[in-house]
Image (tube, coloured by chain):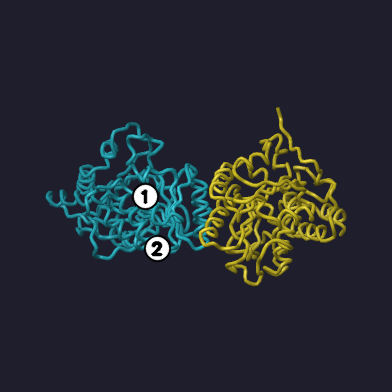
Chain colours: A yellow, B cyan
Amino acid sequence: MMTVSSFPISPRNTPLDERSLSLRRTIVQMVQCANRGHIGSAFSLVEIIRVLYDTILRYDSRNPRWPERDRCILSKGHGCLALYALLADKGFFPEQELWKFCKSDGILGGHPEYGKVPGVEASTGSLGHGLPIGVGFALSAQLDKAAHRIFVIIGDGESNEGSVWEAALCAGKHQLTNLTVIVDYNKQQSYDSTLVVQNLEPFAEKWRTFGFGVEEIDGHDLNALRHTLSRLPIEDSKPSAVICHTVKGKGVPEMEGNPLWHHKTKVSEEEVQNLLRHLGG
Amino acid sequence: MIVRQTSLNMVYELAKQDERVVFIGSELVAGTLKKFKQDMPDRFFMEGVSEANIVGLAAGLALEGKIPYVNTIATFFARRAYEQIVLDMCLHKAKVRLMASGGGLVYAPLGPTHLAIEDISVLRTIPNLTIVAPCDADEMRRLMLLTLDYPGPIYIRLAKGGDPIISRSDPPFQIGKAILLREGSDALVIATGICSKLAMDAATELASQGLEASVLHVHTIKPLDTAAIDQGIQRVPVIVSIEENVTIGGLGGAVAEIIAEASLDRPKRFARIGIPDVFPHQYGSQASLMEAFQITTQNLVDKVMKLSTQSYRSTPESLRK
């Protein structure tokens, strides 16, 4: 019997404000420059990353290696367009870099690279690597009794990887209250829906049984994100998992939940204009 | 003192003097580093059978300034956690020290799942990684002292141990610098790990038969001391490599690459001794498997003698320009 998510709110109906639309327009323009990109995967992430960098994370974009900063790893590295838009917005690097996305003279590739992009804490792309590295960051902070926190954003397709669950067991065992896993649960992986490819449900229950405090929220609802992420850890003595119910391609009806927009190449000028029109541009 | 025990004792010593040192094991023998756990419980981690996570989290700790020494069976690193070694450790230049138990045929009784027969070959292809295979416990001690401040990730291939001591304190041990254990102008034997002992025994035997062989102990397989190898091969007509690893792509493969690209004015006679292109097909002991694969002093003597006496092949007329 197929188990489906019992989360009661449909994130499809959540409205987007001008900042969310503007960030998406930036993403479309980057895709236009490179003629490629994981646009749908970035669109499901925009509000998560926006709230993290606008409200939650402590950082200094002029000193990206500031030791007391919170660490944020985008483990689903293919969602990097959303991250790049925010990092540029916050001044980690000049905006002009955005328009060199995937170009030989740029620093921004199709997956984020540590040491190359200011503000990127770990090179990701191959899935299932960010959470173990994040557990290492969190253990280090725990050893040093440091106050900074570690956030790891993973995908639902990524959650097929065994290393995610190895790391989850480990995080639970060490009671890493400084670690928060944010799952971009857009229910759509590259080939088809997560329900068809590899059903994750009961998803929240899995994280609970691995030793996490868990909350499920609408990942496009700014207030819900702010509310949950500013009250961490969710439970005492446990790492936190925030399962964000999102929509792949959120903001453009024909892209929403459409696997053809998981990774897009050869985007026509007409498609770009159509996307920008939907996004208020 | 066995090699593995020496390396573990050294981790304890290093941890005592440097707070950045942490130890991570997967699922090791009960009581491993008991004193470490007692004295420095915060820095002792036993994380279970989850090598992908362990290598990843070690990289995370290293990026935060810790120096993690990670111990499990060699092949569980090289096969199971290969991508974590490549991406989490090497791409990030994370200062992780993998202590790979049972490099080569050590776990002969446990069968092919536990034998690290190709770790040198596959790991040698990864940028930024340093690979070291000490020949005995004394050399292991010298290596471990240098691992604290050495930049970048290291894979330390541990032999079984109890191996006879052949290393010396002079010249001082340097990572990346091969050691000429013996000099002779008739042949050069290039060896790594415990095979350097076989090479020294073979050189003694060859001397009694009138052939003087150099023995170059290549404890560091990467970065390879190409200068020492290049110099060595120019001085002799015969070169034989010996290693407890598959001959494909291992130390012998690396030496072959150097010889092939050296543009020497006279051709060299060269042979590789190592594990052939098969899965080990029998149990027994490390020694019996090495015997079965002819990774022996006798085979080394025979190969050098044969290459020294055989005439060069002449190119058939039809293939000449």
Q: Residues within 10 Å of mark 2 (few under 14, many from 20)?
A: some
Q: Residue furthest bottom?
A: A62
Give the chain of mark 1: B
Query: Vertical placement of A103 versus A164: above or below?
Result: below
Q: Nearer the viewer, mark 1 or mark 2?
A: 1
Q: Viewer-proximal residue, B285 or B221?
A: B285
Residue type for callout 2: Leu
Query: Vertical placement of A3 versus A68: above or below?
Result: above
Mark toward the start of the polypeptide (1 vs 2): 1
Identify the residue under disc 1.
B34
Count of numbered labels shown in the rendering: 2
Q: Secondary structure at mark 2?
A: loop
* Residue B148 disc label: 2
Q: Is residue B314 visible?
A: no
Side of A223 where B117 appears, left or right: left
**Both on one chain, marks 1 and 2?**
yes
Query: Vertical placement of A45 versus A57: above or below?
Result: above
Residue type for callout 1: Lys
* Residue B79 disc label: none
What residue do we see at 80% from left, 41% from top?
Answer: A8
Side of B272 where B203 appears, left or right: left
Q: CA distance from mark 1 to mark 2?
A: 21 Å
Task: Give how far across and how far down residue B97 sits, in percent.
Answer: 42, 56
Task: Give how far across and how far down residue B298 sits, in percent.
Answer: 20, 42
Task: Give how far across and how far down residue B140 sits, in percent.
Answer: 31, 56
Task: Give how far across and how far down residue B244 sits, in percent.
Answer: 32, 45
Q: Viewer-proximal residue, B184 or A25?
A: A25
Q: Viewer-proximal residue, B17 or B124?
A: B17
Q: Secondary structure at mark 1?
A: helix
